[in-house]
Structure formats: structure tokens, C-alpha cells
């Protein structure tokens, strides 16, 4: 475990090679079985609401029905999550072939909205917990095995692969310090 400012960091984040390979994992993190979808920050609710109409253009009738009948989120302040359909797909999932993708991200990539996707999805498989202080850890799951292989073969570290969401989480200035810090830690392993 490392400490960077007030943040505790799982050493696996520093030492692991990781680069998603969607052709192999099929976007499994968007379709995990379970009652709840992706964790949402309170402030993400409004910005997702303003992206809904564009996201809907990529969604199935099934998802749109859920969005119009219920909502895209459930929970309470501090504990919001996206809604899952049939305890599996996130309500924002659409498919390209057999790969599950995010309709929010699709709309963003087309330049139609200003919100890419929830930070928790963007950072995954890094998670941020709170145990009296923030703790950033690597959630290792079988579905990401192709990403471990891909990262190792192409020598892409998890930190490098996730630079964009880490910048979102830490801020631009802190990100540079964070990368230096991780590189130093890595050299000392
Ligand atoms: S985080 Fe894991 S499951 Fe999600 S896209 Fe990357 S490799 Fe696939």
C-alpha cells in the first residue's frame, strides 16, 4: 500500500500491466450480473440527464422503455447507481455485434454531448473506496484477463492506460505528480 497525499493506493495499481481488449472481453464490465449498475457521483445525475436524449438514439427499445418508465438511476445521495435491466446490462448498454458498449460514450464521441461516461466506469478496474479516507484499489476480475494479457504483451501499464480517467479524478496538476510517484514506486519494487 502506498500513500499519495491523502489517498491510499493499492500497490497492484502501480505494478500491473493492463489494456482493455474489447474483442475478447466483449465489454463485460457493462453487463455484470447484479442488482445495481455503475456507481454514480451525485453531481453526475444532472449531467447525465442532459445527455439522455442523445444517448437514447443508440439504445434499444428495451432500454428506452426502462428509461421512460423508471429512470436511469436508483439509490440515494452518496450511493446512486445506474439501473440494470434484468439484473444484467446497464441501462446505457447498446451492442455493436456482440460487444456491449456505452450509449453515453457513443453520443460524447460523436460530439453530441459533453459527458463521456460515469467516472466509476471510466476508471474501472480501478475503484475508489472510502474507509475513513480515500483508497484507490484494483478490482481484479476474471473478465479482464484479456486486458492483463494485452497490457503485458504491449507493455502498457494500468496507469498509462487509465491516464484520462485518472486526470478526471485527480485533476491535471496532480496527475503529473501521481505518475511520477507511481514510477518511483515501481522502480523500487
Ligand atoms: S475493464 Fe475489463 S471488462 Fe471492462 S472493457 Fe476493460 S477488459 Fe473488458
Image (cartoon, rainbow, N blue to C red):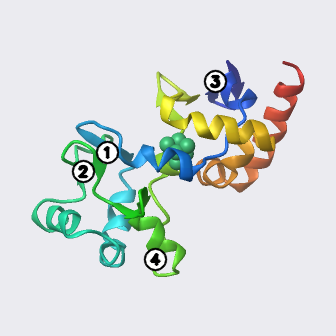
Write down the residue under mark 4: 113
Label 1, label 3: how far apart the Cα atoms are = 24 Å
Q: Residue 153 vs residue 118: left or right?
A: right
Write down the residue under mark 1: 37
Write down the residue under mark 2: 83
**Neighbours of disc 1 within 10 Å: few (<14), some (14-19), many (20+):** many
Q: What x and y, as percent, mark residue 67?
A: 19, 64
Question: Residue at the location (32% across, 78% down)?
Answer: 57
Task: First in sequence, mark 4 or 3: give its number.
Answer: 3
> Looking at the image, which is closer to me, 132 or 140?
140
Residues marked 1 and 2 touching at CB (< 8 Å): yes
Write down the residue under mark 3: 10
Q: Residue 169 vs residue 117: left or right?
A: right
Label 3, label 2: how far apart the Cα atoms are = 29 Å
Q: What x and y, as percent, mark residue 70?
A: 13, 59
Residues marked 3 and 2 touching at CB (< 8 Å): no
Amino acid at each position: 500500500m502506498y500513500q499519495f497525499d491523502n489517498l491510499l493506493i493499492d500497490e497492484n495499481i502501480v505494478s500491473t500491466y493492463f489494456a482493455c481488449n474489447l474483442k475478447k472481453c466483449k465489454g463485460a464490465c457493462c453487463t455484470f450480473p447484479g442488482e445495481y449498475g455503475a456507481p454514480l457521483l451525485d453531481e453526475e445525475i444532472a449531467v447525465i440527464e442532459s445527455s439522455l436524449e442523445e444517448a437514447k438514439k443508440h439504445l434499444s427499445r428495451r432500454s428506452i422503455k426502462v428509461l421512460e418508465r423508471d429512470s436511469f438511476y436508483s439509490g440515494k445521495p452518496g450511493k446512486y447507481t445506474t439501473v440494470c435491466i434484468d439484473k444484467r446490462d446497464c441501462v446505457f448498454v447498446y451492442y455493436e455485434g456482440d460487444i456491449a458498449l456505452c450509449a453515453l460514450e457513443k453520443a460524447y464521441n460523436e460530439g453530441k454531448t459533453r459527458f463521456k461516461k460515469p467516472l466509476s466506469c471510466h476508471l474501472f478496474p480501478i475503484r475508489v473506496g472510502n474507509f475513513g479516507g480515500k483508497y484507490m484499489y484494483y478490482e481484479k476480475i476474471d473478465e479482464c484477463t484479456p486486458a492483463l494479457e494485452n497490457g503485458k504483451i504491449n507493455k502498457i501499464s494500468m496507469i498509462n492506460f487509465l491516464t484520462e480517467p485518472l486526470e478526471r479524478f485527480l485533476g491535471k496538476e496532480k496527475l503529473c505528480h501521481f505518475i511520477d510517484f507511481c514510477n518511483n514506486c515501481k522502480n523500487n519494487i
